[in-house]
Amino acid sequence: MRSLYACPGACVRVSLLLLNCAPILFSQQTASLSGSLTDPTGASIVNAKIEVSCPVVGFNTSVVTDPNGRFTMIGLPAQVVCSITASSPGFRTFTTQFTPHSGQPTRFDIRLDLGFLTETVEVSASRSVTQRQARVPASGIRIRGMNWNTEQYDHFVENPFASPRIQPLSTFSADVDTASYSNIRRVLREGRLPPPGAVRIEEMLNYFPYNQPGPEGDDPFAFQTELAQCPWNASNWLLRVAIRTKPVAMENLPPSNLVFLIDVSGSMDMPSKLPLIKQSMRLLVEQLREQDRVAVAVYAGAAGRVLDPTPGSDKRRILDAIESLRPGGSTNGAQGIRLAYQLARQSLLPKGNNRVILATDGDFNVGVSSDDELVRLIEQERESGVSLSVLGFGMGNLKDSKMEKLADHGNGNYAYIDTLREARKVLVEQMAGTLLTVAKDVKFQLEFNPAAVRSYRLIGYENRVLRPEEFNDDKKDAGDLGAGHQTTALYEIAPIASADLASPVDKLRYQDTKPNRRGKSSSELCFVKVRYKHPQSATSRLLKWPVLAAPGKFQEASADFRFAAAVAEAGQVLRNSKFTADGSLEHARKAAQSALAHDPGGYRAEFVQLLENAIALSAVALK
């Protein structure tokens, strides 16, 4: 094994193993190639393009790296000079020449550094044009001659501490979206810290599977609460409230009427967008049954129908339609949404799952494009009984806030897919939950006992908070839970003996805010209520249970509790929360590391590795 450098000062290190064999003719022998692609932190670069060309014999082929950053090529011409190119958005492209040999494969282990371009930028467009050199990331889209990042995230204000004497009720809608976590993972792997608006702690919490028992009775979900010391503020407590629905196998689902609505505009022409969408959709198509129906629609400057409703058993026809897609043009998302709902209504299944699955980067720039207008369009269309789920792809111009709103108002889910492994998680492992709703309009309401609680705050769920009176309003839309879904919420609680973190207010003139007799004599911390509707019902049902004010030590809490707390602590640090107190990424990493016993899929271990990357990036940012 020896190290090669493409040129002096290059940002690429390559480990190359060549096994020399006797010369043979290409027409008689072929060769193979394998290797891996990593970033400067050692993390795998997934879905990167690896291309090999041999001009002498007119040979050209390409593959993309798998979820572990690895690649393999077979059938290469032996004893012929070829070139290999490794590229991924946000990284400097690597190219070199080599001669493949038959026998054992040639191996490349390539490390790509973050790429930077030197561009000419216009400073003044009015008077005489002056120019300067700008060093900008090589990810993003091209604007006025340079690459730039136009990703959009909502700004939100964290939920503050509230006094139960003044505000005894905390009410919010359930949420099972996971897009924030996988998007944060992508940003960290690019070698950057995420923007605060990208960090939605509830979606980070709900990304991970927890070792929670499912329901046993007639209710569609089981609930669980746990109270322990807060890891980032030793004087406070942390309350975890979690519910889980019963999983259902794909083969036992009702028939599905699906419309794949795929963005094929020019902005989708990069490996992490349309090519990854195609690979992802193939995974979903392989699970379809004869009773399922699939249509395919696309949009760019205009919308078009690619495939009429087709039985799920005709996989070849569906896959051919997906494979035929090519990018180009502007982005009229609203027109595509209207067409997709029209196709869904044509094959509506009264007792089945009717859903549009939108795959896009969210960058709508033609026709109806404002968030408010698109939300109104979705709210009108959902009345037909068709739900909308959104799959986000790509980088540079990702419109995260827009896609989250579309899914929320379309009674669907929002996931961000950065790798083929994530596509398998969302579209194979968890697809039953997306396709089968078991409880709709799920709302939580907690009443805190002022005799035990000085103040409390809900961690995350900022855009899911409801007014207290909306809890009992069955006309108020809320989150839906699918088969096998889990949702977790955390509250930081300042007990009555701690310092008052709530905003001080004067004594009220017209009402008594002291705890009543029941509160004073009770050992309860709070009272939890959950409202939900059966999928075909317009009337909600109520579940309720008390939580005792008996916190345990954090170190003795369950692994699920400790891991969820670590995720919340890391999220607060990444979003620069004013409530972080003694928390840190390193503290969160240690807590997560201690809770890896139950880790199906290895997602918790991956989180620990991501925190190590974030710690390194934070250290660099402070210098």
Image (cartoon, rainbow, N blue to C red):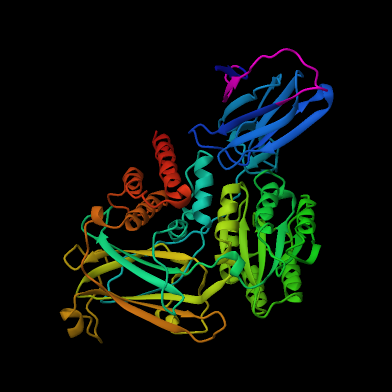
Q: Give the main secondary structure of the magenta stretch.
A: loop
Rendered residue at 24%/55% (across/down) = 556
Please tell me whether residue 541 is drawn above or below residue 291 in the rendered image: below
Quarter of the figure that contains the N terminus: top right
Residue closest to the eye, 427 or 238: 427
Picture coordinates of residue 123, whole percent (x, y) = 64, 39
Q: Is residue 342 left or right of residue 611?
A: right
Residue 553 makes an appearance in the image? yes
Picture coordinates of residue 73, whole percent (x, y) = 69, 32
Residue 419 makes an appearance in the image? no
Give residue 378's quadrant in the image: bottom right
Quarter of the figure that contains the C terminus: top left
Q: Is residue 91 left or right of residue 519?
A: right
Q: Is residue 428 left or right of residue 125?
A: left
Rendered residue at 63%/35% (across/down) = 71
Residue 10 among those drawn in magenta: yes
Give residue 375's quadrant in the image: bottom right
Please tell me whether residue 507 is drawn above or below residue 391 in the rendered image: below
Q: Is residue 61 left or right of residue 425?
A: right
Picture coordinates of residue 444, whole percent (x, y) = 40, 74
Residue 468 among those drawn in magenta: no
Residue lying farthest top? 22
Rendered residue at 69%/37% (across/down) = 63
| Count of marks, rendered view | 0
Please tell me whether residue 330 is drawn above or below residue 34 in the rendered image: below
Residue closest to the eye, 500 or 334: 334
Rendered residue at 38%/80% (across/down) = 543
In magenta, the rendered stretch is 8-31
Picture coordinates of residue 387, whole percent (x, y) = 63, 71
Give residue 373's quadrant in the image: bottom right
Please tell me whether residue 170 is drawn above or below residue 398 in the rendered image: below
